[in-house]
Amino acid sequence: MQAENFADWLHGMMAPLGILLGIALIAWAGLYCLSRAHAWRLARERVGYDEDAFARDMGQQGFDPLLARSVYAYLRDVQKIAFPMMPEDSLDERLGIADKDLEDTIRQCLLDAGREARPGLTVLPPATLEELVRYVQDSPRLADKAARSTSGVFPMQREDAHISGAVRRARVESR
C-alpha cells in the first residue's frame, strides 16, 4: 500500500518516528546520568582537595599560585566544573572542555590574568589543566606589550603623555 499524499505518509511514520525519538531520549538520559555519576564519584574521591590545595600544588611545581587559583576559579564558576580539579585532569575527557569552549576558556583566562595570546607560543592547545595554567603563565603580560610598543619613544611624543600610568594601563587592558 502506498501513501497517496504527505499527510498519509506522515501518519504512517508516527510510530517509527516515536520509537526513534524515545530511544534517543533514553540514550540522552543515560549519558546524562553517567556523567553526573562520574562527577559525584570524583567529588567523593577528592574530598579535601580544593582551590587552595590546587594552588599550593601548582606553586610547588613552579607556577604562580595566584594565576593557578584564577584559572581554577574560572573553570569552577564559569565552566561549572562541580568536582575538585587536579593538575593532571584532561580538559577534554575529564573536564568536558573542548573546541570552542576551550578557545573561550583560554581567551578568558588570559584576559583575567592580564595576559595576551602570543601566536606560535604553542602548536597544540593545552590538553590538561596544568598545561592550561602553563600556557597562561607563559603568555606575555599586557603591560609588557604596552612597554614594548612605546619603547624608544620619548614620553612627550606620545599622545597620551599627560595621562596617569593607571589610566594608561586600564586603556591597554581594555583593548
Image (cartoon, rainbow, N blue to C red):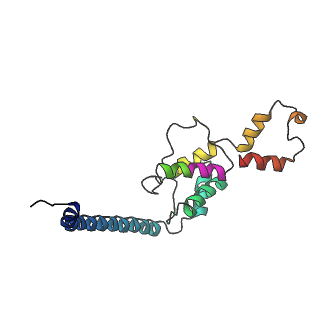
Foreground of the two, 130 or 29: 29
The stretch in magenta equals: 105-112
Relative image position of residue 158 (x, y in whole percent): 85, 36
Which of the 4 image quadrants contains residue 93? Answer: bottom left
In this rendering, does residue 2 appear at all?
yes
Relative image position of residue 56 (x, y in whole percent): 61, 58
Foreground of the two, 2 or 36: 2
What is the quadrant of the N terminus in the image? bottom left
Lateral position of residue 169 relative to residue 99, left or right:
right
Q: Residue at x 44, y 57 (%)?
A: 94
Q: Residue at x 49, y 40 (%)?
A: 124
The single residue placed furthest to the front in the displayed view is 4
Lateral position of residue 47 relative to residue 139, left or right:
left
Lateral position of residue 168 relative to residue 108, left or right:
right
Relative image position of residue 108 (x, y in whole percent): 61, 52
Which of the 4 image quadrants contains residue 24? Answer: bottom left
Q: Is residue 111 magenta?
A: yes
Lateral position of residue 144 relative to residue 159, left or right:
left
Foreground of the two, 99 or 42: 99
Which of the 4 image quadrants contains residue 157? Answer: top right
The single residue placed furthest to the left in the displayed view is 1
Q: Could you tell me what secondary structure mostly forms the magenta stretch?
A: helix
Q: Residue at x 59, y 62 (%)?
A: 51
Position of residue 40 relative to residue 74, above or below, is below
Q: Is residue 1 magenta?
A: no
Foreground of the two, 87 or 95: 95
- Count of all numbered marks drawn on residues in the image: 0
In this rendering, does residue 64 appear at all?
no
